[in-house]
Amino acid sequence: MSLLMQLQPAGKNRYLLPKTGQMQTEAMIYLDEVLFEESLDEDSVKQLRDAASLPGLHGRVLGMPDIHSGYGLPIGGVMAADAEHGLVSAGAVGMDINCGVRLLRTNIEAKSMNRSRLEQLVAAITKRIPTGIGTATPDRRWRGQILEKIFTHGSQAVVEEGWGRLRDVEHTEENGRLAFANPDALGKTMRRRSGQLGTLGGGNHFLELQEVVEIFSPELAKILGLELGSIAFMIHTGSRGFGHQICTEYSNRMAKEAPQHGIRLPNKGLAALPIDSQGGQAYLGAMACAVNYAFANRQIITHLVREAFTEVFGQKDTDLGLDVVYDVAHNIAKFEEHDGKKLLVHRKGATRALPPGHPQNPSVYKSTGHPALLPGSMGTSSYVVVGLPPVVETFCSVNHGAGRVMSRGAARRNITEQEFKASMGDIVTNAENYRQVIDEAPLAYKDIDRVVNVLADIGMVAKVARVVPLAVVKGSGE
């Protein structure tokens, strides 16, 4: 019997995969009936089943509404390991360590942004921020000793160099750094791939100028600084080739060393080691360096975006606003307290959303819960939400966006130029040819409105605002 057939309805927008065979715990997937029928694939469920077969887990393995198959754990997967007796898996974090999203608010009215000004802004941004796979930073200041500081202090190190504002750090998950980073765990090849700070990359990474078109909670939106009809700016990128190399090398090491610890791996993509083992600790130290690197990368890009706005508008960036609303990671493993226990929570294509009053909220969002940022696609809406008390059911995790419904190859083969242009409308892009970004076409993604409503309809999140793209900067390559 297929795994899809084994899934059982378990309440509104919930489907349970019972514990069978080698599974050590159950798996739960959060979908409505339409997404279940139209977008859930067998491979994603198999990957959840395999993850649930690892020893030392706490609670269920979870699939978020944007779930689709990946390497090891599916994208949109959440897995919590007991901090004392559990495992850490590089594949359950992902290749692009701390791929994440940062949102800036502005004092600029969207009606002031005609096409000419949008094109000027795209040009000013692309002049400063290299895009595409393999691009290296053109600014040599981010090499040498400062890079060592970035490994351990993340975006804090960048702000101390004068590239940012103090409040940027306060509005970043974990204040822009994980304290257990260990540069000694970085090999030579990993270090060689750390020369990409201040670059965007390719794939689904983007820089997006947006208009706030809908406010669901005026009170929460006011606290976040979001106003109807205003401009916002979203940054989506991560640790680039540096994180990819760390995941690749440590996944291989985990696969090789797992049998020495009596661990039977369900598949190589879920290679794992005991958290307290030498290899497990080395991976966590290296992963945290990549997490901090990615926070720093988004901070550097923020500074460059502010420069671009200053050039185009002829005003100080502080007069234009350009304040960080929040910066959240969605490929990460962190030690957290849930159910009265210390756990290592792996989130792969999933975002933390702490509810109001949670002690780990940043002070500025203690009473509201910090925002989670859920991008759609380059031609559709994105959402700002906050977690509500029932989100503890998912280890305070929500989806990280819309989620793919079509592979990159299928998108290139099946989406026509006419379909792509129709889906983009008047949105300004930096792409010289639609073929450069066809695999990121809106048709390749799930319906973001429906995906967001899966958790909103069961009271796990509250929608705060919806934004739509006016201009998008993307890089080519995967």
Image (tube, grey):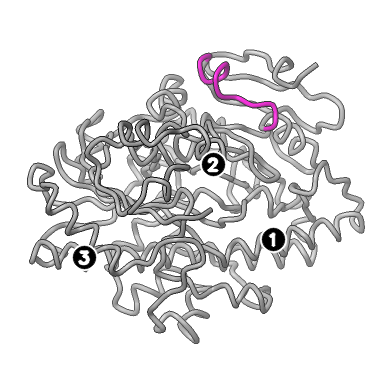
Q: Is residue 325 visible?
A: no
Assess disc 3: are there few (<14), some (14-19) or many (≥20) residues with their C-alpha within 10 Å of its C-alpha.
Answer: many
Of the 4 image quadrants, the one containing the N terminus is top right
Residue 122 at x, y = what percent? 24, 57
Q: Which residues are magenta?
A: 33-43
Asked which quadrant contains residue 475, the reply is: bottom left
Q: Reply yes or no: does residue 313 show up in magenta.
A: no
- Magenta region, main secondary structure: helix
Q: Earlier in the sequence, mark 1 or mark 2?
A: 1
Q: Looking at numbered disc 2 in the image, what kind of residue is underneath it?
A: Arg
On screen, 50 above or below 259? above
Separation of disc 3 and disc 1 at Cα?
35 Å
Q: Is residue 26 visible?
A: yes
Q: Which residue is drawn at the image coordinates 53% and 53% (left, top)?
A: 478
Q: Where is mark 2, residue-wise?
A: 408
Residue 447 at x, y = what percent? 42, 27
- Give whichever of 318, 85 is nearer the camera: 318
- Give whichever of 183, 126 is nearer the camera: 126
Q: Reply yes or no: does residue 38 show up in magenta.
A: yes
The numbered dot on residue 248 is 1
Q: Where is mark 3, residue-wise?
A: 308
